[in-house]
């Protein structure tokens, strides 16, 4: 059943766990994520990249994901990820997302706040116009290094730039930022990056702890691919109620397609067989994340 993002995340936090969010560029992956959520009996979040939402077919994918969430046997939310364009946000909401990460983290502090407030204003007008329900807003404070959709960065090995090159969340700004933006969830930068980590990721637990004591809104950890399970579990104790996965899911699917395509071609151009392997790869990854965060 489709569920409000903040409701889903708060319920998990009350049980000491967090909800995984998975970027879905396609319906096959989304089906696998929801199947894994149903198999494990846990709620999940389907993320849509803004690059997806900016296309007509992407908006149709959102409508399909909304239908998938509606029919799911467990709570599922559909969220537009990392959006900063008000037009794309409005289109995605009209197409069916029920929450948005309004991302002004690359802007100055005041401009970041202004963007989130502008998005809130336009979404409230939209909701009033179509008698819709309130759109849940996540905002981001502090800059995350790396690329959201593709895992390459500053070096030839395809690693993301070191987290230190982007700003860690300034915990002193947290109370003011949450109060003025009205954000219902807060994405933080505590040494996490988008893409692949250079070496072992080192989360700044001191910064996370400092943020957690300054706000009651659930915190969100982006760029969880590559962070050891034990660390992810620890984060839930610091009010991190949502953890975003993208790179590792893509890696698993692409490795599977690479390994299995030739055999399925030989087997009478068996596209269904290949899709079943895709489903299995995404489902296994999602189930592992769901079970890990449920601890
Ligand atoms: Zn992200």
Image (cartoon, rainbow, N blue to C red):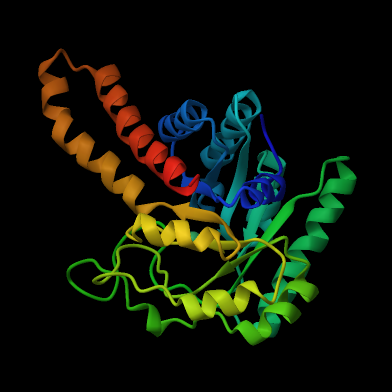
Q: Residue at x 77, y 67 (%)?
A: 118
Q: In the displayed structure, would residue 183 be above or below residue 279?
A: below
Task: List x then y, in percent, for residue 224.
Answer: 41, 59
Q: Give the position of the N terminus as an image quadrant.
A: top right
Q: Residue at x 57, y 30 (%)?
A: 64
Q: Residue at x 25, y 42 (%)?
A: 254
Q: Residue at x 10, y 18 (%)?
A: 266
The reply to whether residue 108 is in sight is no
Label total for image: 0
In this view, the residue in front, 138 or 122, is 138
In this view, the residue in front, 47 or 269, is 47
Residue 89 falls in image quadrant: bottom right
In this view, the residue in front, 31 or 20, is 20
- Left or right of 295: which side holds 264? left
Task: List x then y, in percent, for residue 55.
Answer: 53, 46
Residue 274 falls in image quadrant: top left
Give the residue furthest to the top: 268
Task: List x then y, in percent, for residue 4.
Answer: 71, 43
Residue 59 falls in image quadrant: top right
Q: In the displayed structure, would residue 2 be above or below residue 23?
A: above
The reply to whether residue 283 is in sight is yes
- Left or right of 59: which side holds 227? left
Task: List x then y, in percent, for residue 5.
Answer: 67, 47
Q: In the displayed structure, would residue 168 be above or below residue 31?
A: below
């Amino acid at each position: 059943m489709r569920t409000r993002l903040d409701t889903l995340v708060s319920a998990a936090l009350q049980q000491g766990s967090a909800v995984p969010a998975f970027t879905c560029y396609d319906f096959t992956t989304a089906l696998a994520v929801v199947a894994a959520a149903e198999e494990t009996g846990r709620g999940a979040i389907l993320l849509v990249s803004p690059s997806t939402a900016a296309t007509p077919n992407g908006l149709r994918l959102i409508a399909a994901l909304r239908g998938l969430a509606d029919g799911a046997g467990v709570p599922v939310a559909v969220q537009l990820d990392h959006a900063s364009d008000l037009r794309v946000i409005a289109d995605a909401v009209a197409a069916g997302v029920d929450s948005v990460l309004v991302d002004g983290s690359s802007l100055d502090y005041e401009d970041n706040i202004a963007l989130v407030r502008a998005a809130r204003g336009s979404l409230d007008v939209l909701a009033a116009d179509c008698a819709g329900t309130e759109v849940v807003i996540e905002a981001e404070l502090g800059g995350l290094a790396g690329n959201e959709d593709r895992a390459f960065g500053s070096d030839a090995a395809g690693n993301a730039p070191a987290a230190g090159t982007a700003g860690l969340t300034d915990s002193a700004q947290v109370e003011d930022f949450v109060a003025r933006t009205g954000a219902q969830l807060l994405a933080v930068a505590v040494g996490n990056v988008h893409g692949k980590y250079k070496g072992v990721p080192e989360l700044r637990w001191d910064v996370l702890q400092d943020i957690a004591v300054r706000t009651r809104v659930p915190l969100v950890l982006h760029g969880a691919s590559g962070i050891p399970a034990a660390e992810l579990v620890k984060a839930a104790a610091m009010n991190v109620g949502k953890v975003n996965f993208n790179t590792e899911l893509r890696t698993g699917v692409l490795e599977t397609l690479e390994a299995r395509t030739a055999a399925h071609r030989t087997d009478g151009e068996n596209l269904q067989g290949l899709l079943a392997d895709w489903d299995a790869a995404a489902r296994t990854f999602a189930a592992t994340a769901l079970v890990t965060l449920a601890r």
